[in-house]
Image: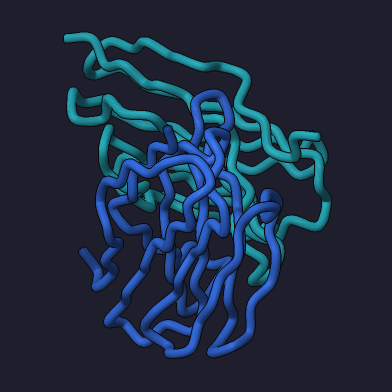
Chain colours: A cyan, B blue
Amino acid sequence: DQQVKQNSPSLSVQEGRISILNCDYTNSMFDYFLWYKKYPAEGPTFLISISSIKDKNEDGRFTVFLNKSAKHLSLHIVPSQPGDSAVYFCAASVSADGLTFGKGTHLIIQP
Amino acid sequence: DAGITQSPRHKVTETGTPVTLRCHQTENHRYMYWYRQDPGHGLRLIHYSYGVKDTDKGEVSDGYSVSRSKTEDFLLTLESATSSQTSVYFCAISERPGTGGYTFGSGTRLTVV
C-alpha cells in the first residue's frame, strides 16, 4: 500500500520553462512534506519542505504547494535549468518516524 | 558532506554470509536512519534510531538488524545475506526530523551473489 505516490516516472521540460512535479498521498497523519533531488551515485539532497499547516512555501526558483483536501502536493521549478535534470523524490513524515518516499520522477531539461 | 560517511561504498558478498554496513556522523545528531533504494521502489525505511541504544523497525526490516552504541555510529547488519538484499543502502541523519532536516550519505552499493 503506497502512501506516497508519484505517478509520472519521467517528465521532459524545455530550458527556461516551468517544471511541475506532482505527488499524492494517502496518510492524513503526515505532518511534513519534503522534496529531494538525486543524481546517480549520490545520496538524495534536500530541496524544500512544507508543514501540513501551510499551503505554500517558496525558496528561490522552487515553490511547493500543498492541497490537504485533495491530499496532493506539487513542486514548481521556475525557470528550469539544465542542472535541474535529476530524479526528484517526494517524501512525507509523521513526527520522527522517518520519511516515506514516492518512487521518484526523472526530470529531463531539454536545451 | 555535512559530516556523514558510509562505509564501505561498494561491497560484493556471497549468499549466506553476514554483512555489516557502517554509518558515521560528526554532527552529533540524535536521529539516524537506514534506507534501501531499489528500481521501481524509491527509498524504503529499514530501521531507525532516536538515540544511543534506542532503535525501531521501519517498513522493510525483515532480515536486518541495527545497533547504535555511540551517538556517531549506526550499524546495519544483514545476518545472512540473500540476493533480494542486493541494493543501494543510504544512511540519513537528523537533528529535527520532520522539518526537512534530513541529510543523506552517499550510499553503499551492496551486491549479493
Image quadrant of residue B14?
top left
Q: Is residue A57 left or right of residue B25?
A: right
Which residue shows up at 61% across the image and 58% down it? B64
**Image position, residue A33 (x, y; %):** 60, 52
Quadrant holding the N terminus of chain A: top right
Image quadrant of residue A16?
top left
Counting the numbered discs, the total is 0
Which residue shows up at 34% across the image and 12% down it? A13
Q: Is residue A54 visible?
A: no
**Image position, residue B55 (x, y; %):** 64, 77
Compared to residue A110, the image places residue A60 above or below, namely below
Image quadrant of residue B97?
bottom right
Quadrant holding the C terminus of chain A: top left
**Image position, residue A76 (x, y; %):** 44, 32
Given residues A33 and B12, the one toward you in this image is B12
Which residue shows up at 63% across the image and 58% down it? A32
Compared to residue A6, the image places residue B104 above or below, namely below
Given residues A59 and B6, the one toward you in this image is B6
Q: Is residue A83 left or right of residue A8?
A: left
Which residue shows up at 27% across the image and 57% down it? B8
**Image position, residue A85 (x, y; %):** 27, 25
Q: Is residue B63 visible?
A: yes
